Image: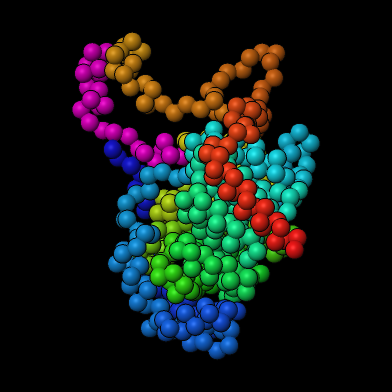
């Protein structure tokens, strides 16, 4: 099997070292804002210099952790192998794009339920994460977790919004026997929030993992130059690695979600500019420098609904970052730069991921697939349509998907777009999989319901 080789580079070895050295200076001379006395104490034990709520991390404190990363003695060691498959992931949104009206609205619990049903029928979307944060219920993160645990066959979750809901979500994960991670993100530039650190401590105490994905924005929360934004992103990633290691003793995956801002027009954060491809390649290279696998916010778009722009921007940055070595892309089903969730877009994303993974697998070259005997049998000027070799291999040698048919014009019949097919497909999958019957036993359902009721009673108290 000859798989596509990951060899795209945008940074030279010298440039990687210069970015690393600048990041180390940022951490040792400027530091991070860490507004939590317990976490500051943990960092100090590892050699950080603590001054109030500022934590400075000298090279001699960080290097032993980076040495562990390079030794590969942890869950996220870079394998050095070509990326073979990419799974899509849903990043919970606030709004839903309504295909019928062409407008967006706030998400509801009904959308969460429909999202679970849709993801059930999409093989390239690995986790049944909440598609929206429902606006029509209290404690929406907690109730979304309950809905997913009750009705999704795939594992999943959503963003954890507060230290009030966090302990109840941990209780539900324990009932389900599942691991649930907390996304301990920096607030760029160079800081954490008090509440996020408090939640992270709860998760660390429960033995649950902590993830991170610094989202610096060139020109607003990071230098406008790509080199400067990468240096700051790398500093926030390394600082997060240090803080997470201090709290859990584990090394997190290297995930960087740098973006550029459209400073000259809208001031919007861009998900689809060519800079996303450059950030994706460079992020993969920096992660490999530390011996870590990587993820970046590639495979995204600025388009507000599924169209050519969306397809071009998504595939361009995804191809670049994956061929540089990243094994994770940004959240799928999003329209615009976190402008909302689209059911049709998620169906299209599942389809292009299928084609993407087909390509990543490459093809086999051996005596049988070379087909010399078939070529000899057909000879000069013949055809291979009736050959047994063709019958044997034609299905494995062709990628087929009903969203992207190979079709001809039918005179007098309107042409249906991929977007229209995706919308119809989304509705059909939801109808096929939508059920109010839980996929777990009654005892687990009762325990989840009790946890939620305890949380709501405590909220009202």
Q: Residue at x 29, y 14 (%)?
A: 388
Q: Residue at x 31, y 19 (%)?
A: 392
- Quadrant containing the N terminus is top left
Q: Nearer the viewer, residue 12 or 188?
A: 188
Magenta segment main secondary structure: helix
The magenta segment is 356-378
Relative vertical location of residue 197 with respect to residue 51 in this rendering, above or below: above
- Residue 403 lies in magenta, yes or no? no
Which percent across, then down, holds residue 58? 44, 84
Relative vertical location of residue 279 with respect to residue 390 in this rendering, above or below: below
- Residue 371 lies in magenta, yes or no? yes
Which percent across, then down, holds residue 268? 70, 59
Relative vertical location of residue 166 with respect to residue 115 in this rendering, above or below: below
Q: Residue at x 66, y 69 (%)?
A: 220
- Chosen colour scheme: rainbow
Which percent across, then down, holds residue 194? 62, 74
Q: Residue at x 66, y 22 (%)?
A: 415
Relative vertical location of residue 172 with respect to residue 70 in this rendering, above or below: above
Q: Nearer the viewer, residue 437 or 388?
A: 437
Which percent across, then down, holds residue 428? 63, 27
Location of residue 229 (image quadrant):
bottom right
- Quadrant containing the C terminus is bottom right
Whether residue 86 is visible here, answered yes or no, is yes
Whether residue 334 is visible here, answered yes or no, is no
Task: Return the residue found at the far bottom.
Answer: 51
């Amino acid at each position: 099997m000859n798989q596509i080789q990951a060899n795209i580079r945008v940074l030279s070895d010298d440039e990687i070292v210069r970015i690393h050295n600048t990041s180390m200076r940022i951490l040792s001379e400027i530091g991070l804002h860490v507004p939590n006395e317990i976490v500051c104490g943990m960092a100090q034990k590892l050699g950080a210099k603590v001054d109030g709520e500022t934590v400075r991390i000298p090279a001699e404190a960080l290097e032993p952790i980076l040495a562990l990363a390079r030794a590969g003695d942890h869950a996220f060691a870079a394998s050095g192998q070509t990326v073979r498959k990419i799974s899509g992931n849903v990043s919970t949104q606030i709004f839903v794009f309504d295909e019928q009206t062409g407008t967006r609205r706030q998400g509801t619990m009904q959308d969460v339920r429909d999202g679970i049903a849709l993801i059930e029928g999409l093989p390239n979307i690995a986790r049944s994460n909440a598609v929206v944060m429902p606006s029509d219920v209290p404690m929406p993160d907690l109730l979304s977790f309950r809905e997913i645990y009750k009705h999704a066959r795939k594992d999943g979750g959503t963003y954890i919004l507060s230290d009030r809901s966090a302990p109840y979500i941990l209780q539900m994960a324990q009932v389900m026997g599942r691991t649930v991670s907390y996304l301990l993100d920096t607030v760029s530039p160079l800081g954490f929030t008090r509440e996020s650190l408090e939640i992270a401590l709860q998760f660390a105490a429960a033995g649950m993992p902590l993830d991170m994905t610094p989202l610096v924005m060139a020109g607003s929360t990071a230098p406008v130059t790509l080199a400067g934004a990468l240096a700051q992103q790398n500093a926030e990633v390394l600082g997060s690695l240090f803080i997470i290691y201090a709290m859990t003793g584990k090394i997190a995956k290297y995930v960087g979600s740098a973006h550029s801002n459209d400073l000259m027009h809208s001031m919007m954060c861009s998900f689809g500019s060519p800079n996303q491809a450059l950030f994706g390649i460079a992020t993969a290279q920096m992660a490999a420098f530390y011996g870590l696998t990587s993820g970046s916010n590639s495979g995204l778009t600025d388009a507000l609904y599924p169209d050519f722009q969306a397809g071009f921007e998504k595939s361009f940055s995804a191809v670049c970052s994956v061929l540089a070595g990243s094994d994770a892309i940004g959240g799928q089903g999003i329209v615009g730069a976190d402008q909302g969730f689209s059911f049709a877009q998620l169906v299209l994303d599942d389809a292009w991921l299928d084609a993407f993974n087909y390509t990543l697998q490459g093809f086999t070259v051996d005596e049988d697939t070379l087909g010399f005997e078939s070529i000899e049998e057909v000879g000069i000027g013949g055809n291979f349509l009736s050959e047994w070799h063709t019958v044997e291999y034609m299905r494995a040698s062709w990628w087929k998907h009903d969203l992207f048919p190979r079709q001809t014009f039918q005179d007098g019949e309107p042409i249906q777009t991929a977007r229209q097919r995706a919308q119809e497909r989304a509705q059909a999958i939801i109808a096929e999989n939508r059920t109010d019957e839980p996929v777990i036993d009654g005892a687990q359902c009762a325990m989840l319901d009790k946890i939620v009721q305890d949380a709501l009673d405590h909220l009202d108290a």
